[in-house]
Amino acid sequence: MSDAALAAAQARYALKGFLREPRTFVFTVILPLFLLVILNGIFRGRSSFFRMRVPFAVYYTPAIISYQIMLAGYSSLLIAVTAERERGMLKRLRGTPMPSWIFLTGEIIRTTVVVAVTVVVLVAVGSGVYHVPIQAHTVIGLAVYTVAGTACMCALGLASTRACATTEAASVAGPFVTLILGFISGVFIPVSIMPTWMLDVGKLFPLEHVARGLQQAFAVPGSTGITAIDLAALAAWGAAGIVTALVSFRWEPHDNW
Amino acid sequence: MGDRVIEVRRLRKSYGGVERLHGISFSVECGEVFGFLGTNGAGKTTTIEILEGYRARDGGEVSVLGTDPARAGRDWRNRIGLVLQESELNPVYTVRETVAMFSRYFRRPTDLDGTIMSAGLADKAGERVGRLSGGERRRVDVAIGLVGDPEVLFLDEPTTGLDPAARRGMWALIEGLRRAGKTVFLTTHYMEEAQRLADRIVILQAGAIAAQGTAEQLSRSLGHATRISFLAPPQIGLAQVSAAVGTRVEQDGRWLGFRSDQAQRDLTALLGWAAEHSVELTDIRVSPPTLDDVFVQLAASPGDAHDDSS
């Protein structure tokens, strides 16, 4: 079996395990759908967004998609990889002829598939139920930010495993960091009613750039929302994540460190 | 080298400035079950993890299948099988799915169903790992270790934590591997397990080899350790029993007992004395030497059975 085929098999295996685990399935697939429905149920009418008045659904659909990219890309990868490390599975895999990068590639492919499928579902619900218009520029921005955002979040997820000594720690840290960034990045509360200083803090982190970029792709007529500053922020965070992961990643359970 | 699968010379390893392995040497021949025996903390897992390529050594020479594990690559990993001491499996996959995934990692995997069957899991193949008993999970570990058809299998304490029935099942499995001609490196802290399964045994104590030889050689040199004990009969003094068996009998709570290097002779004397005096002995136990007994013995006679240079 070639290494590419092995990575694909590893990804299929990881996906099968993901779908069988009720907790991760509920938090990564069901939760964002509920958030979309609840937020659109609370806020009716229009929100100001960059000196425009846009329907709340046009604000929240891309916002929840950005949140989902972090939840599935960062949090769920962090939890899954930490759990396998603490089980001793990563150590066991290191003892087989399979190169270690194939395992991580399989996990990243699994994560990307989950992100892609859930983003499509969220777009379909936004468009079908809340009449959010999806045009060519929206689709381009969506594709670019989903790919760049997922890559950045996966790198940061792997980089964060070292800080989590147990699976429980990862299960708390992943959703916690995602939730806090969600608040300061204007995912749950419209940016028009948030204090400027908090938004400025939010801009320091990657989620804000995915959220704002996607919102522009959805709200601004003719705009893909793609800006150099947003992509540069994601690239910088992604690069920092890759370097941190390469330097600090551990294959053995915490007891053996 | 000849038929030597594993060759270790003057192996040293320190952690935090404290030396844990003091230059141990031993070798494992092709097709034998090699018992690596020691208490917790003796250095068994450190040694096996150096042989498996997980840890770097600080000194000495190590060769496994003619290769230094510290420099070994993918080809070498295709030829070894590992059963680690403490590692869990993801509970959501079935036995078959788990073993199948591992079989993909190897260039020449064995027949999947055959491996699951020989691990004694034929009727559990479709069961999720999370629903298995401790003994069954350990069998999955062994199936994973065997699925690459390795030339040498490392088994790190395969029966620790198992109940007696599961332990006997694991023993039968390892005996089957021996019959199939597999080279097995087995660590254990059960003397009985090593004596039952291993062709040759090394006893590791505090990072040094305290004794080595075949099970028979060790038994002969450590023959004193058989322990005979029974519940103390009422109104019988220690002196009377001691006189009957011709050795000093000791009291331990409600028990009387003594050590014997000729269990048959001493038991005959004990039972003959009891019959003659109409004493009813209950709960008579004849226990083989435990690892603790062996260490007591080794400490008492440092010159005997002591060989850490070969």
Image: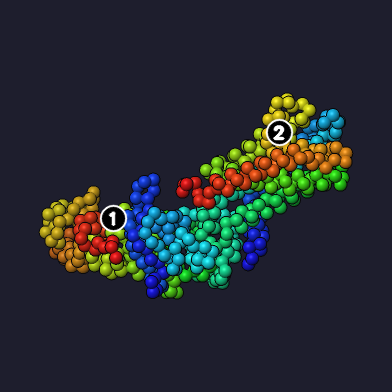
Name the side, left or right, on which B256 lies relative to B101. left
- Is residue A73 visible in the rendered image? The answer is no
Residue in view at x 43 percent, y 74 percent: B181
Q: Which mark is residue B292?
A: 1
* Residue nearer the viewer, A238 or B28: A238
Label 1 amino acid? Asp
Between A53 and A199, the one nearer to me in the picture: A199
Q: Quadrant of residue B32 in the image?
A: bottom left
Chain letter behind tag 2: A
Helix, strand or loop for disc 1: helix
Q: Amino acid at mark 2?
A: Lys
Above or below, comparing residue B238 to residue B76 in the picture: above
Q: Which mark is residue B165?
A: none
Q: Which residue is mark 2?
A: A203
Mark 1 and mark 2: span between their CA atoms?
64 Å
Q: Nearer the viewer, residue B59 or B14?
A: B59
Q: Residue at x 54, y 64 (%)?
A: B74
Residues marked 1 and 2, same chain: no
Q: How is the image coloured?
A: rainbow
User: From the image, which quarter does the N terminus of chain B lie in?
Assistant: bottom left
Q: Quadrant of residue A226?
A: top right
Q: Position of residue B119 (x, y in %)?
A: 50, 67
A94 relative position to A113: left or right: left
Instruction: State which quarter of the image contains the C terminus of chain B.
Output: bottom left
Residue at image location 82% in from the left, 31% down from the top? A49
SS at mark 2 in the image: loop
Q: Residue shown at 86%/47% (left/top)? A: A136
Find residue A190 and report its horizontal and vertical position in percent.
Answer: 77, 31
Other-residue count near label 2 (Cα within 10 Å), few / some / many at <14 / 14–19 / ≥20 = some
Residue B282 point in image, percent of width and height = 24, 58
Q: Nearer the viewer, mark 1 or mark 2?
A: 2
